[in-house]
C-alpha cells in the first residue's frame, strides 16, 4: 500500500518514449531493448507505464531468448509459475502457449483463482499467423469508473468466488495434438477456489478496478442464476469497445499487462495457422476491497502430482522417471 502514495499519473518519462494507442488503454513503448540487465531507472519507468496504460507493447525484441525474458521479468517482480500448467521444457518460468494446444479465447484475468494472483504477464511472440490471432485487453478500472453511482455502491459490497474448475475442454477438442481430457485433468490437478472482492483497490495506483473474467464462479450470497445475471451486468462494462486495445502481433513483439487492472483474450480467427507465444508471469499480492477486506482462499485440493509433466510444441509430455 505504501507504493500508492508514490504513484504520480502525470510523471514525465525520461528514459522511454511512450505512445498511447487508445484514449483509455494501451501504449507502445519505444527506445528500449528489453534485457535482464536493463537499468533500474528504465525499469521503474516501464513499471509506471504499465500501471498507467495497463497494457504496454514493445516491437522488435527478437533478440530475447527464454532466459533473457525470464531475466527481464525478474526486474519487474518475482516470476510465478502457473500452479497447474507445466513450464516449457528446459526453462524455469516460461509458459508456452501454442495454438495446437488450446486457445485462450474468452475474457479472463490470468490465474484469478488463486488469492495472490499475478501482478503482470509478459508475452513474447514466437510464431505469428499471417493474419489474425490478435490479442485484446480491457481496462477494468475504466469499467468501474463507467458504472452509475448506485451500481458502484453495489459493486463495492460484492464478493466473488473464482475457481479453476473451468470448462477448458470445449476449447481444445478441435486440436488433434492434445487429449482434451488429459489437459483438463492437468489444469484441474489442484482445485482452487478463492473469494475476492468484486472491486479491488489497486496496490500501486489506488484506483478501483473490477475483478471478473472466466474464472468467476458465483457471487457470495447469490444463487447461480442471479450470480450469472450480475456477472453479465458488470462484465459488459469491462468489455465496452471504449475500454479495449487490440494488438496485431509480429514475431518479436512483447506485450506486458497489468493483470490487476485488465482482462484479456486471444482472437481465434486464424484457422489452422500456427501461433506461438511465450509468457512469464510476475507474482502479485493479496487484493483488498474498498472496505479493506482481503481476498481469502476457500479451497486448495491437490488431486494429482504434475511435477513430472512439461509442455512442448503444444503437447503435454510426461518425463520418464
Ligand atoms: Fe491469459
Image (spheres, grey):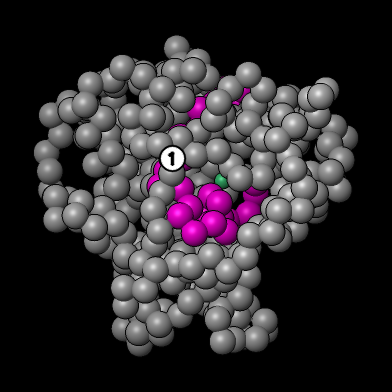
Residue 295: image x %, image y %?
Answer: 45, 67
Give the residue at x 55% y 38%.
81
Residue furthest to the front in view is 321
Q: Could you tell me which quadrant the C terminus lies in?
A: top right
Q: Is residue 107 left or right of residue 63?
A: right
Q: Residue furthest top?
A: 63
Would you name the residue on which mark 1 appears?
A: 282
197 on left or right of 97: left
At a point 48% along the width and 77% down the height, the residue shown is: 159
The residue at 43%/40% (across/down) is: 282
| 117 over 77 or under it: above or below | below
Residue 97 sits inside the magenta stretch: no
In this view of the protein, which residue sits in the foreground, 252 or 302?
Answer: 302
Q: Which residues are magenta?
A: 104-130
Tell me: 202 left or right of 278. left
Residue at x 67% of width, y 35% of height: 86
Where residue 245 sits: x, y (%)?
43, 47
The residue carrying mark 1 has its beta carbon less than 8 Å from ligand 1: no
Q: Nearer the viewer, residue 118 or 62?
A: 118
Q: Which quadrant of the view contains residue 164?
A: bottom right
- Place of residue 302 in the rendered image (x, y in percent of width and height, measured from the top left): 71, 53
* Residue 129 visible in the displayed image: no
125 in magenta: yes
Place of residue 224 in the rendered image (x, y in percent of width and height, measured from the top left) = 67, 81
Amino acid at each position: 500500500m505504501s507504493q500508492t502514495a508514490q504513484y504520480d499519473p502525470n510523471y514525465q518519462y525520461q528514459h522511454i518514449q511512450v505512445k498511447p494507442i487508445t484514449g483509455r488503454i494501451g501504449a507502445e513503448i519505444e527506445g528500449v531493448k528489453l534485457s535482464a540487465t536493463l537499468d533500474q531507472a528504465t525499469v521503474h519507468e516501464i513499471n509506471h507505464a504499465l500501471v498507467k496504460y495497463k497494457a504496454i507493447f514493445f516491437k522488435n525484441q527478437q533478440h530475447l531468448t527464454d532466459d533473457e525474458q525470464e531475466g527481464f521479468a525478474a526486474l519487474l517482480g518475482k516470476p510465478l509459475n502457473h500452479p497447474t500448467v507445466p513450464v516449457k521444457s528446459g526453462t524455469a518460468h516460461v509458459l508456452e502457449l501454442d495454438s495446437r494446444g488450446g486457445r485462450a479465447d474468452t475474457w479472463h484475468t490470468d490465474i484469478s483463482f488463486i488469492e495472490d494472483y499475478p501482478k503482470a504477464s509478459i508475452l513474447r511472440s514466437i510464431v505469428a499467423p499471417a493474419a489474425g490471432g490478435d490479442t485484446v485487453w480491457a481496462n477494468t478500472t475504466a469499467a468501474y469508473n463507467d458504472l452509475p453511482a448506485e451500481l458502484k455502491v453495489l459493486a463495492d459490497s460484492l464478493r466473488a468466488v473464482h475457481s479453476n474448475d473451468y470448462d477448458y475442454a470445449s476449447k481444445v477438442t478441435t486440436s488433434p495434438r492434445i487429449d482434451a481430457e488429459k489437459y483438463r485433468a492437468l489444469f484441474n490437478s489442484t482445485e482452487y477456489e478463492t473469494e475476492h472482492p468484486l472491486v479491488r483497490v489497486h496496490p500501486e495506483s489506488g484506483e478501483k478496478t473490477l475483478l471478473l473474467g472466466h474464472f468467476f464462479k458465483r457471487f457470495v450470497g447469490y444463487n447461480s442464476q442471479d450470480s450469472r445475471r450480475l456477472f453479465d451486468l458488470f462484465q459488459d462494462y469491462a468489455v465496452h469497445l471504449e475500454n479495449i486495445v487490440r494488438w496485431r502481433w509480429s514475431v518479436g513483439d512483447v506485450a506486458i499487462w497489468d493483470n490487476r487492472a485488465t482482462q484479456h483474450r486471444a482472437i481465434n480467427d486464424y484457422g489452422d495457422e500456427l501461433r506461438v507465444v511465450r509468457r512469464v508471469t510476475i507474482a502479485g499480492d493479496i487484493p483488498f476491497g474498498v472496505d479493506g477486506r482481503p481476498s481469502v482462499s476457500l479451497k486448495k485440493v491437490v488431486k494429482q502430482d504434475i511435477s513430472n509433466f512439461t509442455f512442448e510444441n503444444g503437447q503435454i509430455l510426461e518425463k520418464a522417471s
